[in-house]
Image (cartoon, rainbow, N blue to C red):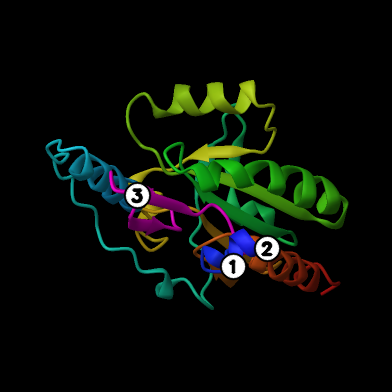
Amino acid sequence: DDVLNRYGGIRTTPVMFLLDRAGKVAEVFDRFNRSDLYAMENKIRSLLGLAPLSLPKPTPQMDLEILKANKAPDFSLPAMDGKIITLSQLNNKVVVLVFWSMEDVISIGILPYFKVTLSEKYRHRDLEVIGVNIDMEEEAKAKTAGFLKANQIKLPVVQATPELIKPYGNINTTPVIILIDRYGYIKEVYEEFNYEIVSQIEDNILSLLQPA
């Protein structure tokens, strides 16, 4: 506790302190999505005297406000196991969409939580958890499938397409967690995941699982 308090009272993880050669704190990172990782690496390169990385390709601005209280945009995509998942055919089920990326350590780390803690725990009560991988590069599908198999993560995971990402507010950072009720309406949208909101997510799922 004494060490944590001296470092600003850290209570959630991960938090990374970047120190310069003199031992002074040059930067503190407590988010690790794509844009944050880019900024973090360039800060490290700056301290090492290296040239900055070239700017990534611009992406449309993310706007999740368009999702709240609206019906979840439908999609029909093959999962990694080849089974077609159609959102509109999951009527009468509570659905959790977990948008994640192989480039984001946080979203990778939460997949086992949604598999073991939520999917297996509440599947008998009509909960469906679906992973949506937002990496759309050519080699992304094989890389994602290999990762899921190697880590025995047996969640249904679909590969996002531009046609899916656009109506979902141009999601370009992860994790993003969306709770959908039995009628297909979006009830909650989480743009981060830490210990403080774990209980909120499960409480909201339990509330949605109550008989209609």
Q: Quadrant of residue 180?
A: bottom right
Front position in the image: 185 or 207: 207
- Tag 1–tag 2 contact (CB < 8 Å): yes
Q: Bin the neighbour count of mark 1 within 10 Å (Cα to Cα): few under 14, some 14-19, many 20 and up.
A: few
Mark sitting on residue 1: 2
Residue 196 horizontal/vertical position (percent): 65, 68
Say what secondary structure mark 1 lies in.
helix
**Which residue type carries mark 1?**
Asn
Residue 22 horizontal/vertical position (percent): 29, 48
Separation (CA) of disc 1 from disc 2: 6 Å
- Tag 3–tag 2 contact (CB < 8 Å): no
Say what secondary structure mark 3 lies in.
loop
Camera-nearest label, 1 or 3:
3
Q: Residue at x 46, y 58 (%)?
A: 30
Front position in the image: 190 or 44: 44
Mark sitting on residue 211: none
- The residue singled out by tag 1 in the image is 5
Say what secondary structure mark 2 lies in.
loop
Q: Earlier in the sequence, mark 1 or mark 3?
A: 1
Q: Looking at the figure, which quarter contains the C terminus?
A: bottom right
**Which residue type carries mark 2?**
Asp
Q: Earlier in the sequence, mark 3 or mark 2?
A: 2
- The residue singled out by tag 3 in the image is 23
* Highlighted magenta segment, given as a residue range: 11-34
Residue 159 horizontal/vertical position (percent): 47, 38
The vertical placement of 14 against 47, above or below, is: below
